[in-house]
Image: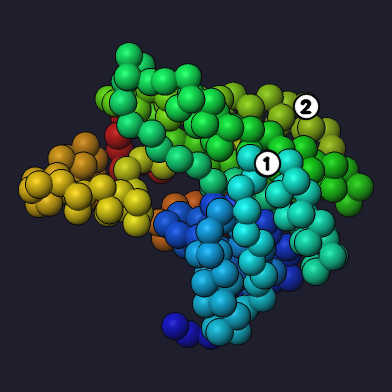
Amino acid sequence: MQNYVPHPEMKDKVIILTGAGAGIGAAAALQFAKCGAKVVVNARGESCEKVAAEIKVAGGKAIACKGDVSMPEVVDRLFDTTLKHFGGLDVLVNVAGIVPAGDVTQATVEQCDEVMRVNVRSVMLTCQRAINIFRKQGGGVIVNVASVAATKGVRNRALYSASKGAVLALTKAMAMDHVTENIRINAISPGTILSPSLQKRIESAQDVSAEYKVYESRQPIGRLGTPEEIAQAILFLASDCNSFMTGANLIVDGGVTL
C-alpha cells in the first residue's frame, strides 16, 4: 500500500466510523485516512484494531475503539476516547449493522429486538452524542448507511428491511430537526456489495458458482458492488463539496432500484 497523501477536503478532520472492522466500514476508514483524516475505527471485535494498525503502518492517523455501539456505555467510551485523543469530531459514519435472513413469519421476538438494537438504536445513540458535540463546535456531518432494502422489497430480509427503513426515516427526521445548526445528516443506500460477510454466505452454499450468480443477477449493471465504491460515496457525503445536501438518500446500487 502506498503512503497516504493528504486531501484538502479531509486533511486533519476527525472521523468516527462504527462497524468499520471489515467490508464497507473498513474501506471507508482506509479511504478517509488516505485523505489525511484522523480516523476512529469501531467494531465489536478485534478487527477494528487490525484496520487501525493498517492505517498507521501506511502513515495515517487512527485509533481503535472496540465495542457494541448499541450499548450506551460503549458509545460514551467511543466519543470520550475520540475527544480525548483527537480533541474534536467532524464526521460520524454509522456502518454497524447485522443482516438477519427470513420472512416475517420466520422472525422471532428476540431476532426483532436484536436487529432493532444493533441497526437502529446504535444510530440513535451515536447521533445523540455527535449532535451535542457539533452544536458546541458550530457544525458537523453524519452519514448513516441504510440499504436499498429500506425502499425496495427484498425477499427473506423482512427484519433487516424494517430496520434500514427506520434508519432512513430517522436520518430525514434528524436532518430536519438540525438543519439550522450547520449539521448535515444524510444516508447512503448500497445495493448488493461483495463484502466479507456476503462472500462467506456465498462460499457456504452447496454450489458456490451458482450462488454467486444468483446475487450477481440481481444487479442490472451486471456485477456486484465493492466496499471501495461505497466508501467513495461515503466520502462524498462527508465532504464540504456537497454542503447544500442534507436529509438525502444517496442510492448506490448498480441499477437495482431503477
Q: Is residue 169 above or below residue 123?
A: above
Real-space CA distance between mark 1 and mark 2, rounded to the nearest whole angstrom: 24 Å
Neighbour class for label 2 at 10 Å: few (<14), some, many (≥20)?
few
User: At x 81% / y 56%, what residue is drawn?
Assistant: 80
Q: Quadrant of residue 235?
A: bottom right
Judge left or right: residue 193 versus residue 2: left
Relative to 227, is 118 on the left or the right? right
Residue designated by label 1: 71
Secondary structure category for the residue under label 1 = loop
- Mark 1, Cα crowd under 10 Å, few <14 / some 14-19 / many 20+, is some
Q: Position of residue 61 (x, y in %)?
A: 66, 76
- The residue most toward the right is 136
Q: Quadrant of residue 131?
A: top right
Residue drawn 44% across the image and 83% down it: 1
Q: Which mark is residue 177?
A: 2
Circle 2: residue type: Asp
Q: Amino acid at mark 1?
A: Met
Q: Nearer the viewer, residue 11 or 122?
A: 122
Q: State the residue at coordinates (71%, 38%).
A: 125
Q: Which of the two labelled residues, at mark 1 and mark 2, occupies the earlier sequence position?
A: 1
**Residue 53 picture location, percent across and down:** 56, 77
The image quarter containing residue 228 is: bottom left
Q: Nearer the viewer, mark 1 or mark 2?
A: 1
Between residue 120 and residue 12, name the one nearer to us.
120
| One can see residue 5 in this view | no
Labelled disc at residue 206: none
